[in-house]
Amino acid sequence: MPCKPLVVAILTALLPFAALAQAQDNGAYKVLKIQLVGGGGGFDYVTADPDGRNLYVARSGPSGHIGVFNLDTLAQVGDIPGVSAHGGAVDTATGHGFATSKPVTMFDSKTFAILKKIDVQGNPDGYLNDAYNHRFYVLSHAEPNITVLDDKDGAILGTIDIGGAPEQAATDGHGRIYVDIEDKSAIAVIDANTMKMVGKYDVSSKGGGCAGLALDAKNNILFAACRENKNMIILSATDGHIITDLPIGAGSDGATFNPATMEAFSSQGDGTLTVVKEDSPTSFSVEQTVATPARAKVLTLDTKTSQILTITAEYGPVPATPPSTATPTVAGAGGPPQGAPAFMRGPRAPMIPNSFQILVIGK
């Protein structure tokens, strides 16, 4: 008897997990769970809400929606339909969430009901929710680069020009925000009170195409995960001087820092997750490279369990596309970002239906 589609999908998800069990190194971190979710639509970012114990997964396209999953069980506990977004985050204090759709979607973090739509300029992509003054930052490769929203009511408070394409932002919780500028090999420094860029750190001497950014707020250390030289550039958040750089995999699209373990993480689309240990504010080392399914290139941290969560899917073969109709490769012109690995350039491989997965990585 032929296998039913659901059975095939489950087997598709389990086979990579079996292979990973063989591929894992002897380090402490491992892929603990692969949860098959399925469903249609593209995907970009994933965000954990450790306080509310929810995981927000945005799907894009005609069937776009935001799936909400329990952080402890990965059971789906909610859904926000009709929202094609790159990602979203919530503010625990106000009980409001925002998704980088166009227009931006504001929702209730308890009921997941849509509260309002907010028209913004540019193309909403990345984002940061800053608990310091309860503001949500919408990042866009097109101008304006950053739009600032009030978490309380969704009001547009202003825009910030950083002179390039922002990818990821990090806050120190005390009024300073840092944003990596992917196409300028730089990191912008923003004053959260005045909503002005007050500095810019040049990292071009060590590489570029930085798409992930994490911060050790206690020691004022920035970790920029960059594609061009496949490295993590580690620098002072105080004055921008580069401390060192360390090798990572290809195609990073996210970074995070866990102050409980003093470790920075970079997820890469080449099937690796790099763990960098901060032994001291001046001493860093690659602690482990964890094998993951390919294209698990974004990540989020559950600060209460110290587990990393990422998302991916299975893909079919790359179609044979004539050069004249191939996906453009110029960053900022509709193609993949600067320093993108081979799988992000040219014609894209189609995602296998119902193969979307959530991964849990931990000790």
Image (cartoon, rainbow, N blue to C red):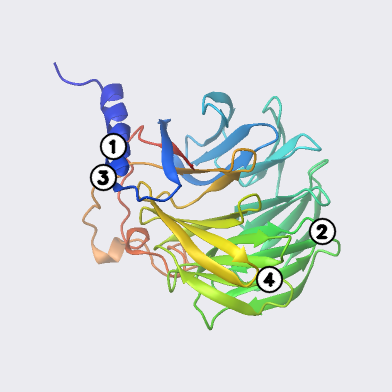
In this picture, residue 261 sits left or right of residue 285:
right
For residue 205, above or below residue 16: below
Mark identifier at residue 188: 4
Residue 141, located in which quarter of the rendered image?
Answer: bottom right
> Could you tell me which residue is drawn at 36 percent across and 57 percent down?
270
First in sequence: mark 2 vs mark 1? 1
Gap in Å between the C-alphas at discs 1 and 4?
42 Å
- Give the residue type that dot 3 points to: Gly
Residue 165 at what x, y percent from top left? 59, 67
Q: Quadrant of the N terminus?
A: top left
> Could you tell me which residue is drawn at 33 percent across and 58 percent down?
343
* Neighbours of disc 3 within 10 Å: few (<14), some (14-19), many (20+): few
Label 1, on which residue? 18
Residue 56 at what x, y percent from top left? 58, 37
Query: Which of the two marks, 4 or 2, is nearer to us in this view?
Result: 2
Query: Which of the two marks, 1 or 4, is nearer to us in this view?
Result: 1
- Give the residue type that dot 1 points to: Ala
Which of 175/19 is in front?
Answer: 19
Q: Dots 4 and 2: beta carbons under 8 Å?
A: no
Gap in Å between the C-alphas at discs 4 and 2?
16 Å
- Give the residue type that dot 4 points to: Ala
* Neighbours of disc 4 within 10 Å: few (<14), some (14-19), many (20+): many
Label 3, on which residue? 316
Gap in Å between the C-alphas at discs 2 and 3?
46 Å
Mark identifier at residue 58: none
Q: Residue furthest left?
A: 1
First in sequence: mark 4 vs mark 2? 2
> Could you tell me which residue is drawn at 27 percent across and 41 percent down?
19
| SS at badge 4 | strand
Gap in Å between the C-alphas at discs 3 and 1?
19 Å
First in sequence: mark 1 vs mark 4? 1
Label 2, on which residue? 174
